[in-house]
Amino acid sequence: MGDGTKQGSGFILNTQSFKNAENLLLIKILKTKFYLNCTLHKDRDKYKNFIKKESMPKFKELVIPYFHESMKYKLD
């Protein structure tokens, strides 16, 4: 819950510590298993995953049951 935040109308997963191949694998899994539209965004010399606006309702539906009350503001 602490490694992500809303950015614009989408959501950033802070995966900068992952290797590029690992980020691409995560995107593939999020797309095929959860039907989330994601892209890779460059952050200085590393990359992080971005969940696009059209996937936010589905993303929220998937994660909200597991979010601690104090962290739900990240989804608004």
Image (spheres, helix red, strand yellow):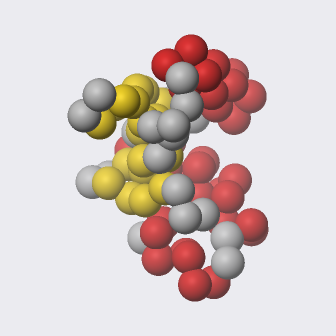
Q: Position of residue 24 (x, y in %)?
A: 55, 19
- Residue 43 drawn above or below residue 28: below
Please say whether residue 27 is visible from this viewpoint: no
Q: Residue at x 61, y 22 (%)?
A: 22
Residue shown at 32% from the left, 54% from the top: 7
Q: From the viewer's side, name the closer residue of 5 and 59.
A: 5
Left or right: 16 as drawn, with respect to 46? right
Residue at 60% of width from left, 48% of height from top?
Answer: 58
10 with respect to 61 (left or right): left
Residue at figure coordinates x 74%, y 66% from the top left: 66
Residue that lies at the very extreme toward the bottom in this rendered image: 70
Q: Is residue 24 above or below residue 9?
A: above
Q: Residue 32, located in which quarter of the rendered image?
A: top right
Instruction: Give the number of marks.
Output: 0
12 and 76: which is toward the camera: 12
Question: Quarter of the image containing the N terminus?
Answer: bottom right
Report the front residue among 68 and 56: 68
Figure quadrant of residue 76: bottom left
Q: Nearer the viewer, residue 48 or 46?
A: 46
| Place of residue 4 in the rendered image (x, y in percent of width and height, measured from the top left) | 49, 56
Res 34 visible: yes
Determine whether 42 is above or below 67 in the image. above
* Residue 10 image point, x, y percent: 38, 48
The image quadrant of residue 50 is top left
